[in-house]
Structure formats: structure tokens, C-alpha cells
Amino acid sequence: MTEHECPLCKLTIKSKVYYEDRIVTVLDCMKCKIPMAVSKRHTMKMGLYELSHILNIILKLFGPAVMLHTDQRSIPEHWHTHIEVVE
Ligand SMILES: [Zn+2]
Ligand SMILES: [Zn+2]
């Protein structure tokens, strides 16, 4: 899959967007109907700064009571995580 075919690179956003900057977009997953964080870069390699930045954003938006589903089954070449808020 090239970047031109990747749905996470295109990310034509029709769902609710919680947060966006040059590193990450946090939005509702169209399929799962739960929030997910998507890296802006088309890679599975995550730098420590990027990863800690994304985790901090998730913490600010949803608090500490969340479970991250980081399995990359649907799109294996582009880092993203689903965010399940647990009470
Ligand atoms: Zn999903
Ligand atoms: Zn991509």
C-alpha cells in the first residue's frame, strides 16, 4: 500500500475531530465508532517524542482511564491506535 492509497494518509474527515496538530489527528473511527489517534506519518516507526506527545494528547482529552488498542490489523503500515474509555 502506498501513501496515495492509504486511508489514514488521506483521512478525509467526516467524523468528529477531537484534536489535530502536525503530529497526530484524534478523531472518531468511522467503523468502530470510538475515538482513535492517527499519526500523520505513513510508517509504523514512532519516535519517542512523537509517541509521548500522542500519549499526552490522549491523556488530556480522555483522562487516564483508557485502554489503547494498538493492533494494526486493518492498516498495518500506518501507526494508529483506538482509544477505549473505561470507567
Ligand atoms: Zn476503528
Ligand atoms: Zn498512510
Image (spheres, rainbow, N blue to C red):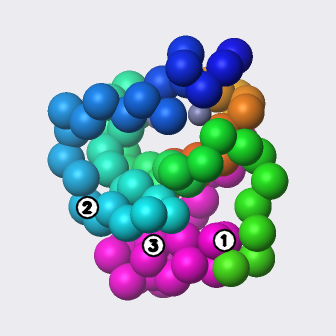
Per the image, the residue denoted by label 1 is 51
What residue is at 30 percent from the left and 30 percent from the top?
12
Q: Is residue 41 visible?
A: yes
Q: Examine the rendered structure and indicate whether residue 81 appears above or below residue 33.
A: below
Q: Which residues are magenta?
A: 50-71
Residue kind at label 3, given as amino acid type: Ile
Q: Examine the rendered structure and indicate whether residue 59 appears above or below residue 42.
A: below
**Left or right: residue 3 compared with residue 24:** right
Q: Secondary structure at mark 3?
A: helix
Q: Quadrant of residue 26?
A: bottom left
Residue 22 belongs to magenta span: no
Residue 62 vs residue 40, the one in the foreground: 40
Q: CA distance from mark 2 to mark 1?
A: 18 Å
Q: Residues within 10 Å of mark 1 (few under 14, many from 20)?
A: some
Query: Where residue 39 appears, x then y in whole percent?
Result: 55, 53
Task: Choose the circle earlier in sequence order: 2 or 3.
Answer: 2
Query: Where residue 24 appears, x then y in whole percent?
Result: 47, 60
Q: Secondary structure at mark 2?
A: strand
Per the image, the residue denoted by label 3 is 58
Q: CA distance from mark 1 to mark 3?
A: 11 Å
What residue is at 51 percent from the left and 82 percent from the top?
56
Residue kind at label 2, given as amino acid type: Tyr
Q: CA distance from mark 2 to mark 3?
A: 10 Å
Q: Quadrant of the N terminus?
A: top right
